[in-house]
Image: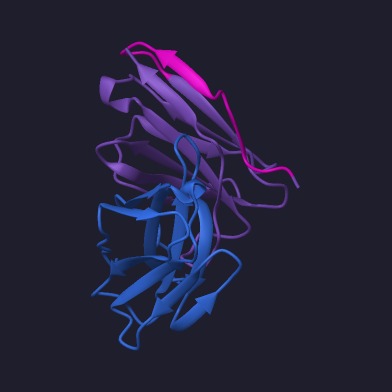
Chain colours: A blue, B purple
Amino acid sequence: LAKTTQPISMDSYEGQEVNITCSHNNIATNDYITWYQQFPSQGPRFIIQGYKTKVTNEVASLFIPADRKSSTLSLPRVSLSDTAVYYCLVGDPSGGGADGLTFGKGTHLIIQP
Amino acid sequence: KAGVTQTPRYLIKTRGQQVTLSCSPISGHRSVSWYQQTPGQGLQFLFEYFSETQRNKGNFPGRFSGRQFSNSRSEMNVSTLELGDSALYLCASSLGRIRARETQYFGPGTRLLVL
């Protein structure tokens, strides 16, 4: 089970681009990287997922270097509503155990006006 | 399509009691997972049910149990409640067995307070 390390908290301002990096030194060949967002008193919400290089959707981009030992979630032009906890998950899509289900403590992102 | 629903949303119990929480997955989803979230431990995996069978289990005592019905709805039971069981209990559903690549859709959670 690949352990992930993220910053506990980050601050930024409206309109800025925010990058949250997750370290996963023990990532396995079959592991995918997934990011979730959670607002207070709500369940986590899927943001983006990738295996290598770069993935982009309408919400965010995910950058994964060639060695895949880290990944960076990029949120363009953040707003106050992006204040939330962001979780990085790493796991094996073919595994039968609890792989990929460890959310960790996440990164508390605070956006200020 | 309706999202994941959980009932009740809030619950207050006393130590020693038991509690049953309910989760209705998104229509067509066959996997239901349960998580416990506390400020100190974060979001922790409890168990996964798929086709009425428990497939995975996290590191929780036997007081925590669950089941899944033929319509994929799931219930979670906690017996002999302890103060430390106070938490937000989240249910998530997915189309197939949960994997890192399978997107999980979470419900709003049930906030349990044990006095």
Of residues B2 and A111, the one drawn nearer to the viewer in this rendering = A111
Above or below, B49 against A29 in this view is: above
Q: Left or right of B112: which side holds B67?
A: right
Task: State the image coordinates of residue B56 (x, y, percent, origin top left).
Answer: 42, 52
Q: Which residues are magenta?
A: B2-18
Task: State the image coordinates of residue B114 (x, y, percent, origin top left).
Answer: 34, 17
Of residues B48 and A47, the one drawn nearer to the viewer in this rendering = A47
Q: Residue at x 31, y 43 (%)?
A: B42
Q: Residue at x 36, y 55 (%)?
A: A12
Q: Left or right of A49: which side holds B16?
A: left
Task: State the image coordinates of residue B46 (x, y, percent, origin top left).
Answer: 39, 43
Q: Residue at x 30, y 75 (%)?
A: A70
Instruction: Residue B13: say if magenta.
Output: yes
Task: State the image coordinates of residue A55 (x, y, percent, origin top left).
Answer: 51, 77
Specify whether residue A99 is in view.
no
- Picture quarter with the C terminus of chain B: top left
Above or below, A98 against A84 in this view is: below
